[in-house]
């Protein structure tokens, strides 16, 4: 092997090493971005869990509420056989 061939191979290996170092640096930067993205996504997931927990609590409260019919009559109405209008409101728990 001639000296020039050896020098060319060394130069090629140096270029390959530089390329690998650039890829490694890019990988580390990407890794740091992924870690930050994962941290932010964890915050979003926790917020959604809280929202769903609150919504589930409200839903359960409305589903389990005892409802009471309140007749809606007007003083000018007569006592005919017309059905009364009613609204349903949650009864107070004892």
Image: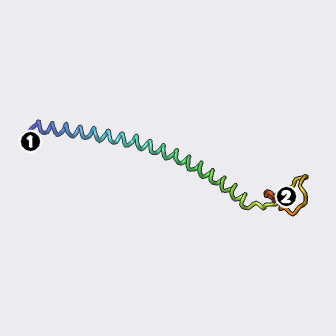
Quarter holding the N terminus? top left
Q: Mark 1, residues whose alpha carbon is within 10 Å: few (<14), some, or many (≥20)?
A: few
Q: Which residue is mark 1?
A: 1
Quarter of image, res 77: bottom right
Q: Give the number of callouts.
A: 2
Circle number at residue 46: none
Choose top left, top right, bottom left or bottom right for residue 2.
top left
From the top left corner, tell me how far across and down residue 29 is, in percent.
40, 40
Q: In terms of depth relative to the viewer, which is nearer, 9 or 46?
A: 46
Give the CA distance from mark 2 to mark 1.
107 Å
Q: Secondary structure at mark 2?
A: strand
Which numbered tag is attached to residue 71? Answer: 2
Q: Secondary structure at mark 1?
A: loop
The answer to whether residue 62 is left or right of residue 44 is: right
Residue 14 image position (x, y, % from top left): 23, 38
> Residue 87, image x and y in percent?
80, 57
The residue lying toward the viewer, choosing from 21 and 40, is 40
Residue 6 image point, x, y percent = 14, 39
Q: Nearer the viewer, residue 52 or 19?
A: 52
Q: Is residue 45 left or right of residue 33?
A: right
Q: Give me the residue at 52% from left, 47% from top.
A: 41
Residue 9 appears in which quarter of the rendering? top left
Quarter of the image that includes the C terminus? bottom right
Ranked by sequence position, the earlier of labels 2 and 1 is 1
Residue sitting at x 45%, y 45%: 34
> Disc 2 vs disc 1: Cβ atoms closer than 8 Å?
no
Which residue is drawn at the image coordinates 24% and 40% (left, top)?
16
In the rendered structure, the answer to whether residue 43 lies left or right of residue 15 reads: right
């Amino acid at each position: 092997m001639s000296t020039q061939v050896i020098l060319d191979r060394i130069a090629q290996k140096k270029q390959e090493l530089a390329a690998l170092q650039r890829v490694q640096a890019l990988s580390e930067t990407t890794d740091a971005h992924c870690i930050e993205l994962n941290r932010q996504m964890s915050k979003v997931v926790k917020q959604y869990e809280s929202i769903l927990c609150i919504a589930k609590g409200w839903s359960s409260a409305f589903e389990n509420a005892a409802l009471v019919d309140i007749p809606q009559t007007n003083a000018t109405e007569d006592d005919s056989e017309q059905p009364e209008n009613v609204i349903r409101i949650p009864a107070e728990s004892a």
